Image (cartoon, grey):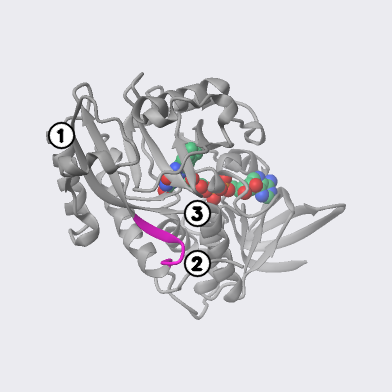
Amino acid sequence: MKAYDVIIIGGGVHGAGVLQAAAAAGHSALLIEKHSLASGTSSKSSKLIHGGLRYLESGQLSLVRESLKERAIHLRIAAELVELKPFFIPVYGDTRRRPWALNVGLSIYALLGGFGRAMRFGAVPRREWGNLDGLKTQGLDTIIRYHDAQTDDAMLTRAVVQSALELGAEVLMPADFVGASLEENGVEVTVSAGAVTRKLTARVLVNAAGPWAPQVARAVVPGIFVPNVDLVQGTHIVLPHPLTCGIYYVESPSDGRAVFLMPWRGATMVGTTETPFSGDPDDVRPLPAEEEYLLDVARHYFPALRRFTPADITERFAGLRVLPAASDAAFDRSRETIFSTDREPRPRVLGIYGGKLTGWRAAAAQVLDRIGPSLPAARRRAATDQLILRRPQ
Ligand SMILES: Cc1cc2nc3c(=O)[nH]c(=O)nc-3n(C[C@H](O)[C@H](O)[C@H](O)COP(=O)(O)OP(=O)(O)OC[C@H]3O[C@@H](n4cnc5c(N)ncnc54)[C@H](O)[C@@H]3O)c2cc1C
């Protein structure tokens, strides 16, 4: 039976990050993915490497600070994959977030980000309003510009796995995690790849299965604690119209939620929604009502997009957020990553629930800290905040 220090379930950005962090720390590590890398949530995000300006509204200051730190690290180690972009917030007479509130928020954002060029913000001069991709100017009071970063989420995930492979890590794919049994000093893991079922052992099993994480946790015997989480669907649509100046951060005219319009492969990507989801995560699909909602936002702010109907959508995709179970609106719930272990201080299973694309490296570092006492001594090969991520072939 082949033995590893760490076996990771899930080839999304979190699984990729833990694979890289484990290999960089000198451990033997294997990642198991049932479809292909980033086939889950990590190819369905808004593709922003950002501090999350709107999380200031729900007081998540430490999350914003850490995310801005990670954004700065990405701009240094993943310059081929992550690009700083101008973001425009148009404020009309009826916009709920008023200029003073946005300026206060952006000042806090700049403070948490340590100031510097990438944290600059200010009003766009009125003479430039007409050059912003045909943004509606009727009723416009001001436009505020700041900066955040955009990536290709699936490509970033593959780049992290490539970096892990260069450090000696392994990937088994496509292969399905079937179950695991806890032993005194580790875990026996059952995996099926095609017609073949294999047994492997690990000191620690890391459950990075995103929205499937509760399913994976329930397949561990004897049973372990499974955090109470909700799945909330988010849809994006792509419209065949180029957007060139930057990313627009607007309010939905129907409910005031923040929605992004972003340049994406020569077209316009609009997202996202927050729709409660129950059922099998494999079945998540964009809903017609979500597409109409996003089209309404696009048509409201860009007269050139008024001609588009659902039949014009060139691409649509939906992903699932994993949020702490609660009765309040998804918009206001914590985006902090939840780590859950079977025991302390020497866990055999660690589950990652929720989190952000932006925070994958910091989350992976925390995972390695938590599982460190269960792992054999090893010689560190690299530090993940120094490893350059390249565009995968
Ligand atoms: C709509 C939306 C927009 C978002 N936008 C942003 C954003 O702009 N910026 C940001 O920072 N964050 C964003 N996020 C959050 C971010 O996308 C997620 O935090 C991140 O992608 C989660 O990655 P993950 O690795 O945990 O899960 P996933 O990417 O879902 O990976 C889990 C993997 O596990 C695999 N798996 C499941 N079961 C098994 C099994 N039994 N055996 C083997 N493999 C299995 C799946 O195939 C899948 O590939 C967004 C999320 C959503 C839903």
Q: Amino acid at mark 3?
A: Asp
* Rendered image: mark on residue 99: 1
Residue 337 visible within the image: no
Q: Label 3 vs label 2: CA separation? A: 21 Å
Dot 2 surroundings within 10 Å: few (below 14), some, or many (20 or more)? many
- Image depth: mark 3 or mark 2 in front: 3
- Above/below status of 133 relative to 74: above
Q: Amino acid at mark 1?
A: Pro
Q: Label 3 vs label 1: CA separation? A: 31 Å
Residue at 22 percent of width and 55 percent of height: 119
Residue at 52 percent of width and 20 percent of height: 289
N-term mark: 3 or 2 = 2
> Is 316 displayed left or right of 108 in the figure?
right
Q: Are marks 3 and 1 in contact (CB under 8 Å)?
A: no
Residue at 52 percent of width and 54 percent of height: 14
| Position in image of residue 322 (x %, y %) | 49, 37
N-term mark: 3 or 1 = 1
- Above/below status of 376 relative to 294: below
> Is 340 displayed left or right of 162 in the figure?
left
Q: In the rendered image, which residue does mark 2 sit on?
A: 21
- Residue stretch in magenta: 78-84
Q: In the rendered image, which residue does mark 3 sit on?
A: 152
Q: Amino acid at mark 2?
A: Ala
N-term mark: 2 or 1 = 2
Q: Nearer the viewer, residue 29 or 261?
A: 261
| Position in image of residue 285 (x %, y %) | 61, 31
| Position in image of residue 272 (x %, y %) | 45, 34
Residue 321 belongs to the span the image colors magenta: no
Say whether mark 3 is within 8 Å of ligand 1: no
Say whether mark 1 is within 8 Å of ligand 1: no
